Amino acid sequence: MTGPSRSSGFGSRASSFGGFGIGLLLSGMGCGALLGALLATTISERMGHGRIIWLASLLTCPLTALMPWARPGWSVYVATAGLAALSMGGVVRFVAQSSFQQAMTPDRLLGRMSATTRFVSWGGIPLGGILGGVSGSVFGAAGTLWIGAAGMTLSVLPALLSPLRTVRGIPAGAAPEAAH
């Protein structure tokens, strides 16, 4: 076998987490997403829709670095907290981003904007799956998790470097055709 030992990766350790550990990780993500859905509007209104689009990712994506360190025992709880925070931040960002996009887009273009956004966002999922599989084969699961953590954290840069970093609320009259 070439490349790193498979026994050092997260995938091979997952079975040693047992049903409780795996369930804890997955339910942590679900609980984080639910909490994000409950808090998204409040957080966006307080922080600003534009700001929260980059800030939610900046605060939560680095927590994916907890995953490569997860082992059976106490570190599974830490990784679960990181995944819960990531899920919460992702939902808060998604709600703020969707609200911002819909408010800024004229009614006649909403369908196109939504379809394009989903195509770009979801279109990368198959490519990410293939690249993740190749990366796992070359670098092992832990290495792939590190690459994913770095990629997710760096993904905030386009929004952070855009005018969104200073936008508090959705500009009044953003989509002038909405009144028609």
Image: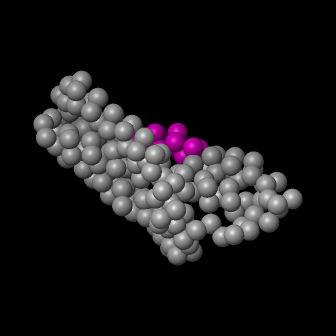
Q: Looking at the figure, which quarter contains the C terminus?
A: bottom right
Q: Is-magenta flag for residue 14? A: no
User: Could you tell me if residue 122 is visible in this image?
Assistant: yes
Residue ID at (25%, 50%): 66
* Residue at the far top in the pictured view: 19
Relative image position of residue 23 (x, y in whole percent): 29, 29
Q: Quadrant of residue 58?
A: bottom left
Q: Is residue 125 left or right of residue 25?
A: right
Residue ID at (36%, 56%): 60
Give the camera-side residue of 1 and 143.
Answer: 143
Relative image position of residue 124 (x, y in whole percent): 54, 46
Prevailing secondary structure of the magenta residues: helix
Measured along the vertical axis of the image, is residue 51 above or below residue 3? Answer: below
Give the camera-side residue of 22 and 5.
Answer: 22
Relative image position of residue 47 (x, y in whole percent): 47, 66
Give the camera-side residue of 15 and 96.
Answer: 96
Measured along the vertical axis of the image, is residue 109 above or below residue 172? Answer: above
Q: Looking at the figure, which quarter contains the N terminus?
A: top left
User: Could you tell me if residue 53 is visible in this image?
Assistant: no
Residue ID at (20%, 39%): 76
| Residue range corresponding to the magenta coloring | 122-135
Total marks placed = 0
* Residue at the far right in the pictured view: 180
Relative image position of residue 74 (x, y in whole percent): 13, 40
- The colouring scheme, among rainbow, by chain, secondary structure or one colour, is one colour
Measured along the vertical axis of the image, is residue 19 above or below residue 82? Answer: above
Q: Is-magenta flag for residue 127? A: yes
